[in-house]
Image (cartoon, grey):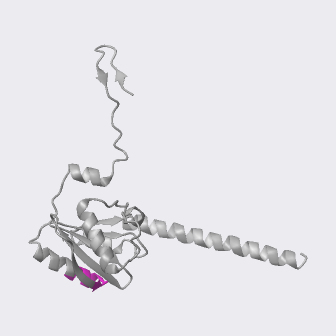
Amino acid sequence: MRKYNAESSKKIPNPVDTSNISNTVLAVENKIEYGAYVGLDVHKDTIAVAVAESGRGEPLYEGEIANNPYKVFKLVERLYKRYGGQVLLWCYEAGPCGYVLYHQLMELGEECQVVAPSKTPRKPGDRIKTDRRDALILARQLRSGDLTAVWVPDSDQEAMRDLTRTRDDFKAQEHKARQQLNAFVLRHGY
């Protein structure tokens, strides 16, 4: 619906609500050209790595590295040299490994996104999941802007979140134990 200005009778459109515009759209407006897009499939012990260069070429699988700070540093160093110091954009899916890798990459001066697995586009019937395939898909979709980044808490916020979750867990255990004790007492006629 359009509003009319009574004085000039010109049509004045409603202001655009930009509160729900995705990060991808905003990134397109402030387009940063990255040297390459790195997709990471992160697990407890290993990280599968794939790199999609700018342009339309197929992403390349770099292999697996151990999930430890030294190996991640060496990977960053190797890719930094390969792409002549250009800015690289890294991503991995949110999961049980948390945000340690995100914070490590940011400390190394790299740009990183943690993406929502539930919002990662998947082909219907695509049930074969391997680390290699997942890393290649992430690199390709990161380059095309099809991924949705999640909010990453800083270390203080993450610590508060962990504390709150731990308290909630203990309160739930306390409630369950209280119910079991009351049921036990009731079964024995008290």
Task: Please state the horizontal and vertical placement of residue 170, each as a whole percent of the image.
Answer: 61, 73
Quadrant including the N terminus: top left
Identify the residue at horizontal 17%, vertical 64% (top origin).
56
Quadrant including the C terminus: bottom right
Q: Between residues 173 and 156, which one lies in front from this camera angle?
A: 173
Q: Is residue 7 left or right of residue 172?
A: left
> Magenta stretch?
65-74
Task: Please state the horizontal and vertical placement of residue 129, each as a whole percent of the image.
Answer: 38, 77
Q: Between residues 9 and 167, which one lies in front from this camera angle?
A: 9
Predominant secondary structure in magenta? helix
Name the residue at the top extreme: 7
Asked if residue 124 is positioned above or below residue 130 in the image, the reply reads above
Identify the residue at horizontal 42%, vertical 64% (top origin).
118
State yes or no: residue 3 in magenta.
Answer: no
State yes or no: residue 68 in magenta.
Answer: yes
Task: Please state the horizontal and vertical placement of residue 78, each as a whole percent of the image.
Answer: 15, 80
Identify the residue at horizontal 30%, vertical 59% (top origin).
146
Name the residue at the front extreme: 125
Q: Is residue 106 left or right of residue 175?
A: left
Count the marks: how many? 0
Identify the residue at horizontal 29%, vertical 75% (top origin).
135
User: Toward which corner of the image does residue 77 lie, by quadrant?
Assistant: bottom left
Asked if residue 13 is positioned above or below residue 56 in the image, the reply reads above
Name the residue at the right extreme: 189
User: Toward which corner of the image does residue 18 lie, by quadrant?
Assistant: top left
Asked if residue 117 is positioned above or below residue 49 in the image, the reply reads above
Task: Please state the horizontal and vertical placement of residue 125, each as a whole percent of the image.
Answer: 41, 69
